[in-house]
Each structure stands twice: as C-alpha cells, then as structure tokens.
Image (cartoon, helix red, strand yellow):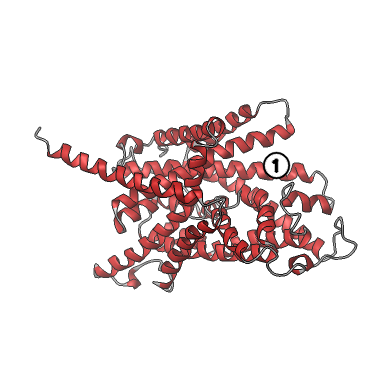
Amino acid sequence: MQDSHTSLERKMESRHLLMISLGGVIGTGLFLSSGYTIHQAGPVGTILAYGIGAIVIYLVMLCLGELSVAMPQTGSFHVYADKYIGPGTGFTTAILYWLTWTVALGSEFTAAGLIMRTWFPHTATWVWSALFMVVIFTVNALSVRIFAEAEFWFSSIKVFAIVAFIILGLLAITGILPIKGYTHAPGLINLFKDGLFPTGFKGVFTTMLTVNFAFSGTELIGVTAGETKDPEHNIPKAIHTTLLRLVIFFIGSIVVMAALIPWQKAGVNESPFVLVLSNIGLPFAGDIMNFVVLTAIMSAANSGLYASTRMLWSLANEGMISPRVAHTNKRGVPLLALCLSMVGGVLALLSSVVAASTVYLVLVSISGLAVVIVWMVIALSEINFRKSWLAGGHSVDELKYRTPWYPVVPWAAFIMSLLSCVLIVFDPTQRPSLYYMLPFLLLCYAFYYGRERWRKRRAAMPK
C-alpha cells in the first residue's frame, strides 16, 4: 500500500540483512542446548543432523529467494500463501509465525533476567526482565534503521564469539593450546572412539527436530523484504551465503565441542562453550559466555519483536485484521502492531509463571512446530508461483532471481520439512506438539472462513 500512514520504509542495507539472517539463527540453542544434542545423538550423529538441517533450510531459502525478489513484501510468507495456496492458509501462516516469535519473547526476557541474577543476585528477576523489555521496545519503536543497526551489533558480538571459540578449540585439538584432562593433543578421537552412533541411529532423527528449530530464524530475510534497500541484489546475496555460514558456525562449533568433551559428559551440567573455555584455561570463561548468551538473548528478542510486529502489520495491510493495526508513524513504524506484539510477549511470559503446565506448554508446543510448517508453506508457494508465472505467459528468464533446479529444490524442501514434523511421532517428549498443533490449525482455518462468511452476510444485508 502506498498510503503514507500505512507504508514502511526501505532503510535496511546489505550488511544489516546479512547480520539479521545470522542473528535470527544464532541463539541460546547453540550456546546452551548444543551439548545436550551431542549427548543424545553422539558426536557424528549430531554433526550429521546439523548437516541435514543446514541443507533443509538452504533449500527453503532458495525458494524464498525467488518469491522475495519477485514480490518484496513485508510479512511475505503469508502474502505468498494467500495468493498461491489459499487465503485460509495465508491467515494461518501469519498467526503461526506471529505466535512463534511472541512466545519466544516471553522466554527470552525471562532468560535475560536470570542471567543478570548471576551478577546481581539480590535484584529480582522481573526487574531485569522489565528493563530489557523497555530497551527492546524502544529500539523497535524508534525506526527500522535503528532496529537493524542494533541487530547488526548484537549479531556481530555473537559471530565474533563463535569464531574465537572455534579458533581456540582448533588450537586445543591440535595440541598448540593445553587443555585440562589431556597430556597430548586430543585430535578427533572423541568423535569416533565409541562408534559412529553410540546412542543408535534413531538419535539422529530425534535430534533433527531440535536442529531444525535451532535453524529457525533464517527465514527472517523474507520478513525484511519490504524494508530492504535494493532487494533484487541484497536478498540473493544474503541467501547464497546462508549454507556456508550455518556450516561454519554450527557444525564448526559442534566439531570443536565433540572433539574436546566426551559425548557422555556433554551438556549434562553446564554450557559446552563454558566447559571448553574453562578447560583451556581462559580467565572468566563463565562471565564471558554469560555476556555472549545475554547478547544472543537480546538479539533474539529484538528480531522476535520485529518479526511479530511486521506479521501483524502485514495481516492488517492485507485486510485480514483491523486496518488500524497497519497504521504507521512518520518514521514508518507500525506502533499499534508493535504494542500488540509486546503485549503478546508479556502475556506469554506471565503464562510461563502462572500456567506453565497448561497454557504455556500448549503455546510452546505449537510454536515449536510452527516454523517448520512455515517452511513447508514457503516451498509450496514457490511451486505454485512458478506454475502461475508460466501460465500467465511469462518465461523463467524474466525472473530476476530463480530458484535453481526447479521443481526438485522446492519439492525436496517441502518433503524434508514434512518429514521433520512426522518424525516427532517417534520422540515421546515432543509427540504432544502434534496433538496441540493439529487442533490449533483447524481452529485457525475455522476462524478465518467463519469470519469471511459473516462478512459476506453482513455485506449482503440491506442498508
């Protein structure tokens, strides 16, 4: 829409987009949960699962690239789904993605408060959580450029920390740096000494679910499309480096951890990052990693509030919810959508305190699967978009960015994402996600079509 009161501004540059795509992925999952993943699947199994996960998200990003360059719109996923799958799917996709980031907001603010308690034990957790809420809200409320700049620096700190960790780890693996518990270079013996899959190959499948959720956030590139300068150039540039970055940061970190920590001990008591750095003898390893994790949390909350806000704006912009939500101020910020998303995050936080085993459990279960479903929607939208493009008399050569190896790439992305959902059946701890997700999907579709039917009846009534 071109109305000055509902339009967004293209203020994001290439460096912002590159770091936002990184920032959305590198979160507490890598810093805190990766050790548990190694413990569950073994070293080689975890590396294999992360490798497969990286391929899945790269295939999804190749699909998103063609769609985003052809139609660079904010909140793009549900717009594409609306047009190329169906309006009910478009509405449901937007609700799922909004819920994913809103629920994450609550947990991120809580985690930030808990980390601050390690340095200030006599201050209540909620005080720090409230402070971080104000900071993140202000950053998003000022302008999209300030949001992007903040995310650039948050992500830069995370990237620097991971690169430093990998370098120090490699020096320890080769014996250049001494490491506690080893009298000689450990090499890669810990990766293979108990066999390729010490917990069985099944561990790879169940770990893949966690891995896919860890990679969620890469698709933020699509959300930013409507506010990116020169999307034809900058979006493909960000997408083409996605796989390389995921391999370096995730798999590189996993290899270092698995080589320096026996898989039986990984993730049992503390972050594997802290354990490795402490064993190398790095002073204040715990404080340094707590600072990095706090930065990761702030980055995730920053990206989450942005993503959920733009998804609400897009819903309003497409006429699916009240048009007042699409209203923007003179700096191009949709303040009402921002406030609603922040309220959603606060409610998620409160539900984690007062209804952790009921309401919050359901929300977390639904949001965990939601991103994988969004990936399926992106892949199917690409398949139908290309069919529609050719049926309209256009040629593939007219597209400024093309998904390679069509239709193999989108179908592979769709099927592999679908398998991630199906595999949940084999993991008793994650199986309830399906029980909550399926009724929620039906409820979203029923709400959308019920409301549309009511609107048509109202429109048909005599004035």
Can residue 461 be seen here? The reply is yes
Residue 378 at what x, y percent from top left?
40, 59
Residue 327 at what x, y percent from top left?
35, 36
- The image quadrant of residue 106 is top right
Which residue corresponds to the image point at 24% horizontal and 70% vertical from the top-left?
393
Query: Which residue is tagged 1?
Result: 291
- Crowd around label 1: few <14 · some 14–19 · many ≥20 (10 Å): some
Q: Is residue 150 left or right of residue 82?
A: right
Residue 364 at what x, y percent from top left?
51, 43
- The image quadrant of residue 195 is bottom right
Can residue 74 be seen here? The reply is no
Which residue corresponds to the image point at 46% horizontal and 51% vertical from the top-left?
434
* Location of residue 77 with respect to 351 vertically, above or below: below
Task: For the C terminus, give its image quadrant.
Answer: top left
Which residue corresponds to the image point at 32% horizontal and 43% vertical from the top-left?
317
Outermost residue, left direction?
A: 462
Q: Is residue 330 left or right of residue 14?
A: left
* Location of residue 136 with respect to 311 vertically, above or below: above
Which residue corresponds to the image point at 30% horizontal and 45% vertical from the top-left?
446
Residue 305 at what x, y percent from top left?
49, 40
Q: Nearer the viewer, residue 270 or 308?
A: 270
Tell me which amino acid carries mark 1: Phe
Q: How many marks?
A: 1
Q: Secondary structure at mark 1?
A: helix
Q: Is residue 451 left or right of residue 272?
A: left
- The image quadrant of residue 113 is top right
* Location of residue 310 with respect to 14 vertically, above or below: above
Q: Nearer the viewer, residue 190 or 273?
A: 190
